[in-house]
Amino acid sequence: MKNSSLYKGSLTTIILKLLNEHDKMYGYQITQRAEEITQGELIITEGALYPCLHKLKAKGFVDVEVLMIGNRKRKYYKLTEEGTRETVKKLAELEDYITIMRALVNPKFRPE
Amino acid sequence: MKNSSLYKGSLTTIILKLLNEHDKMYGYQITQRAEEITQGELIITEGALYPCLHKLKAKGFVDVEVLMIGNRKRKYYKLTEEGTRETVKKLAELEDYITIMRALVNPKFRPE
DNA sequence: AATATATACATAATATTATTATGCATAATA
DNA sequence: TATTATGCATAATAATATTATGTATATATT
């Protein structure tokens, strides 16, 4: 997603955070919301999105609810309690990552 | 490196930046310097390091010089001009990445 | 009415990136 | 003398994502 390898490994964190502030979301909605927030910068591909959602389900981090909208199905994902804890953990990891990368990249942020 | 998938995709950026401020470095030295700067947080494994250095060489981003230290060889890597341009590019990508992740994770940093 | 685009899910083949394990060898330290 | 540190390298495997493809309904455009 984006022509930078840096996004590799951050999709789960992104999805968890979006779910965390929307109560429940379906796959397509997640891609649209991510694009919206980043002003078109972050395109989540389906080949990455759906396997990731299925894995979150398998780990018990989300519950799934299928709704029919007209003749079309939507699969809504909602964080479980464990999923909420995982989100907190992932966000803390992101903070750590940014702190460390900042130190590596900018000598000003390095420890004495 | 570290128990977080977020680092996936950032090794090349890290190495380029370290080379950028050291004139020339050898592989083992890179791992030690990274560990030093991050106070032991960032462990670069050899299985990731050497293939990455070889790829930088193949792309013309570094020149290699083999020196014998006693009976032991060291392969020094030094940025080429193209490698320096690549470093600037990668650092800009890192800034963009951090900006976007911040927006995703913290509503305060989202565009209106 | 026909066609294109958007919505909505899913998976297979492939590529990228890294971990873990292994191998070889010299130098320093306990 | 045995362990740890230094120094390079690669193979097997795992994790993560891209690209391509498939299926289908809904909406907008010509």
Image: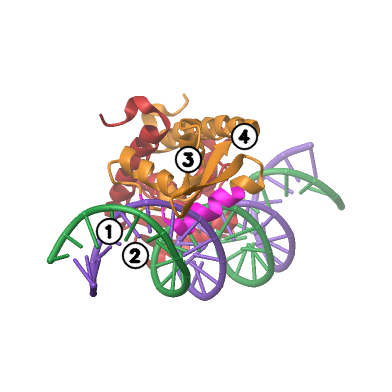
Chain colours: A orange, B red, C purple, D green
Answer above or below: position of A99 versus C14.
above
Do marks 2 and 4 share a subunit?
Answer: no
Quadrant housing the C terminus of chain B: top left
What secondary structure is marked by label 1? Answer: helix
Front-most of residues A15 and B14: A15
**Looking at the image, can residue B107 be seen?**
yes
Give the CA separation, mark 2 to mark 4. 49 Å
Q: Which residue is mark 1?
A: B82
Q: Which residue is mark 2?
A: B60
Circles 2 and 1: CB atoms closer than 8 Å:
yes
Front-most of residues B64 and B88: B88
Does the stretch in magenta take in A45?
yes
x and y percentages locating residue D11 in the rendered image = 65, 72
Do marks 3 and 1 share a subunit?
Answer: no
Label of residue A80 in the image: 4
What secondary structure is marked by label 3? Answer: strand
Q: Nearer the viewer, mark 1 or mark 4?
A: 4
Q: Nearer the viewer, mark 2 or mark 4?
A: 4
* Quarter occupied by residue B57: bottom left
Circles 4 and 3: CB atoms closer than 8 Å:
no
Q: Which residue is mark 3?
A: A25
